[in-house]
Image (cartoon, rainbow, N blue to C red):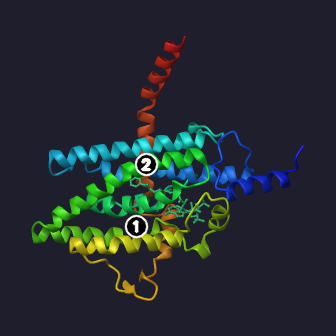
Amino acid sequence: MKSITQLEKEFQARIDRDEKIEPKDWMPEAYRKTLIRQISQHAHSEVVGMLPEGNWITRAPSLRRKVALLAKIQDEGGHGLYLYSATETLGISRDELVEQLHAGRAKYSSIFNYPALTWADMGSIGYLVDGAAIVNQVALTRTSYGPYARAMVRICKEESFHQRQGYEILLTLCRGTEAQKQMAQESLNRWWWPALMMFGPHDKDSPHTAQSMKWKIKRKTNDELRQYFVDMTVPQAKVLGLTIPDPDLKWNEERGHYDFGEINWDEFWKVVKGHGRCNKERLDTRRKVSEEGAWVRDAAVAYAEKKAA
Ligand code: BYC
């Protein structure tokens, strides 16, 4: 029988050859745990991410906007399902994962603990939040774990539609009245920094990045992705005629990238640790909808069992 050290060596060699790891393959316990942590956090983010936008379905300014917003939120529920399924291939049940979220033991993206206060926020969420999500997720289409990589390919396709619908909302506001343009600017001012926080702590302060890069769970580091996002987003804001709320933002000719200001890390960690503006409200809502929807799940199970009998 092979020793753990030998198995680990062979595993790393497979990763180095860019082979995909599949559910039944041998994997180090820490690789499995890291994947469960990251993919389930991602799944929770999709599901909690439905809430800030869900608030605006009844207040969408036209039928066309309402339909697009409904479709986007429904897609996010679907993304959550693909990701919970991918996590389940690692030997943990969906019930356990959802229980971890409801008990406040699992993380989800900090961004969804900020409130959506105006219609322009539907634009900023699509433009910035989905924009940041795409940058992160395109890199993850090459992640080493097969089921996660395949889920990402499908999610990225839908996410790019989400980003465009958000951008188009802002474009319409920016071409509208002065008050509408101001609403767009005010919204961008509130969402810009939280969007940059989505990429996580600086690489030097990130406990997981080095190992996750070695295992190719992550294909780009937090700082690399954040820089890519800034470089991509700033020209788009110029087309909108909006100002990025960062006095230190400046094109750096030598680096070929934008320099930008420092994130307020105290705020980031406060939100991650559960003390943001909406943390409590988001979890309370998730628990409530889960309780209220229990009869639907029970009915679906009863129907499936009857059909199978
Ligand atoms: N928020 O060592 P690090 C979306 C935690 S939503 C909260 O860098 P890692 C969408 C981190 O979990 C986008 N927590 O960790 C949906 C870790 O804590 P633990 C969701 C954060 O995992 C609806 C600790 O800080 N996308 O798509 O190597 C509408 C140290 O961090 C955050 C994903 O989840 C944060 N922002 O890197 C619209 C993508 N940042 O676990 C859009 C997949 C860090 O040790 N995930 N933490 O207790 C990833 O790529 C990585 O997990 C992260 C963090 C880059 C997020």
Mark 1: which amino acid? Ala
Location of residue 81 in the rendering, given as x and y in whole percent from the top left corner = 47, 40
Left or right of 122 in this view: 112:
right
Location of residue 174 in the rendering, given as x and y in whole percent from the top left corner = 17, 68
Q: Secondary structure at mark 1?
A: helix
The residue located at (46%, 28%) in the rendering is 297
Work out how far the residue at label 2 is from the one at label 1, CA to CA, in angstroms: 19 Å
Q: Residues within 10 Å of mark 2 (few under 14, many from 20)?
A: many
Looking at this view, name the residue that lies furthest to the right.
1
* Label 2 lies in ligand 1 vicinity (Cβ under 8 Å): yes
Looking at this view, name the residue that lies furthest to the bottom.
254
Residue sitting nearer the eye, 204 or 113: 204
Q: Which residue is mark 1?
A: 195
User: In the rendered view of the protein, which quadrant contains the N terminus?
Assistant: top right
Mark 2: which amino acid? Ile
Location of residue 237 in the rendering, given as x and y in whole percent from the top left corner = 27, 72
Q: Which residue is mark 2?
A: 155
The residue located at (26%, 55%) in the rendering is 165
**Quick one: label 2 or label 1, which is nearer the N terminus?**
2
Left or right of 82 in this view: 235:
left
Q: Nearer the viewer, mark 2 or mark 1?
A: 2
The residue located at (34%, 60%) in the rendering is 115
Q: State if disc 1 and disc 2 touch (CB < 8 Å).
A: no
